[in-house]
Amino acid sequence: QSVTLEELRQAADAITQLYLNRGYLTSRAILASQNIVGGQVTIQVIEGRIGDIQVEGTERLRERYVRRRIALGANVPLRTDQLEDQLRLLRSDPLLENVEASLRAGESLGESTLIVRVVEADPLVGSISVDNYSPPSVGSERTGVALAHRNLTGLADTFSASYNRTTRGGSHVFDLNYRLPVNPMEGTVQLRTVFERNQVLQEPFDEFDIEGESERYEVSFRQPVVRSPREELAFSAGFSYRDGQTLAFDRIPIGLGANDDGETRTSVFRLGQEYVRRDVKGAWALRSQFNIGTGLLNATQNADLPDSEFLSWLGQAQRVERVGDDHLLIFQLDAQLTDNALLSSEQFVIGGGQSVRGFRQNARAGDNGIRFSVEDRFTLVRDEAGASTLQIIPFFDTGVVWNDEDNIELADQTFLAGIGLGVFWQMLPDLTIRLDLSLPLIDLDDRGVNAQDDGVYFNVNYGL
């Protein structure tokens, strides 16, 4: 069968179109000049590729941080949608304020040079906050300050520190955190330590001079295996050690499972799995964590009482659903399950402004628990850029806890539920206010007289 030169060119164009339809915009097929031998004609396919990635605009951040992440989308042949995915991820990186990219012809046939221009964000960030999210026993109103450097050594490593103190001085919490990315898929090593000092100030328990302190040390590694603007799948592994002590009258030990000095220690391996999926109407976020308690590092071990040897599972699921331009639904479900009696530091707690509203912070705690919450966020006012600045938020919270049969029996009324209305107001670009008013649907016998017991919660945050 004979073919014309025009038909051969059409065949080359059809191959080029096949590449274009599949996103390979820099690939093409050509009918090169050639000597036809034996009736055989060669159509040459030039598959596009990135020959060089040039990064401009970096200051403290190393160029390879940007280059290695973009290279994940620079496969051969080059698919521009995969390259754009990596650029979108970079644009969402808090280290960068702006990212622009352009392609230009390279030195070789089919080769392109990618020029990436970046503007680094201010590495120093911070905030000052005031809220009433602390347990009333140590003072419910607290102030906090947080500072972070998001590129401490030029390796995109983040060091953060925060300090929270109740206004009555019953609680002091120092939290230090260091994170270091170790590969372009955002595999991250994290080191964390938390120091807490507490004193019970609530009457009449303040007469017992109850004081507690604890230290927690954590090391973990998190590795995404799938990462794109649409979804992320990640696994993590870590180890945490906690040493706590609670005493009354400076000498009498308090706490189930504590030794004669009032001390409890836990050594726990934590294995996590996370999945996030985004769609046009919202996003799903799923998280699972297995906690494996051990007797390492002289951790607490008891025959019949709770100790550091246990196995528990913590699961979390969240759905954010955009119903309309000014209407956002948020569903959240948390659960913890175990067959072991747990020390208080590992128990599931409900109650408070960030849990089941309508009740005081940590109103109930147990080895096992379930919490469900739904918020309906209506935007009333937007700024000139279209961002929501005033929202009204009806909500419903509920939760229940229960203990393993080997642990002590819980008090009555372990099921909580509340319904209410919240307001979010971004008064200034860096100043936000959140106020929640909740009506408890369960009348607890041990309800106190704190604002939390009346279902009133607030948070004021100012970004530095």
Image (tube, rainbow, N blue to C red):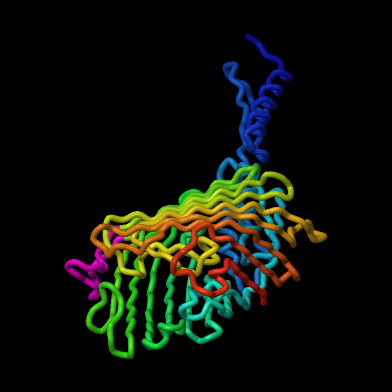
The answer to whether one can see residue 225 in this image is: yes
Query: Taken as a whole, is the magenta stretch helix, strand or loop?
Result: loop
Q: Quadrant of residue 353?
A: bottom right
Furthest toward the bottom, the residue is 250
Reply above or below: 428 against 319. Answer: below
- Nearer to the camera, 342 or 464: 342
**Which quadrant of the figure contains the C terminus?**
bottom right
- Nearer to the camera, 128 or 222: 128
Residue shown at 53% from the left, 86% from the top = 168
The answer to whether one can see residue 74 in this image is: no
**Which quadrant of the figure contains the N terminus?**
top right
Furthest toward the left, the residue is 303
- Nearer to the camera, 407 or 416: 416
Q: Quadrant of residue 252?
A: bottom left
Residue shown at 65% from the left, 58% from the top = 91
Reply above or below: 119 against 203. Answer: above
Q: Quadrant of residue 10?
A: top right
Where residue 315 sits in the image (x, y, percent)? Answer: 42, 53
Where residue 307 sits in the image (x, y, percent)? Answer: 25, 68
Is 459 one of the magenta-colored residues?
A: no
Where residue 313 sits in the image (x, y, percent)? Answer: 35, 55
- Nearer to the camera, 289 or 20: 289
Residue shown at 72% from the left, 66% from the top = 426
Reply above or below: 417 against 126. Answer: above
Q: Which residues are magenta?
A: 292-311
Where residue 178 sits in the image (x, y, percent)? Answer: 48, 73
Reply above or below: 230 against 390. Answer: above
Q: Is residue 96 left or right of residue 172?
A: right
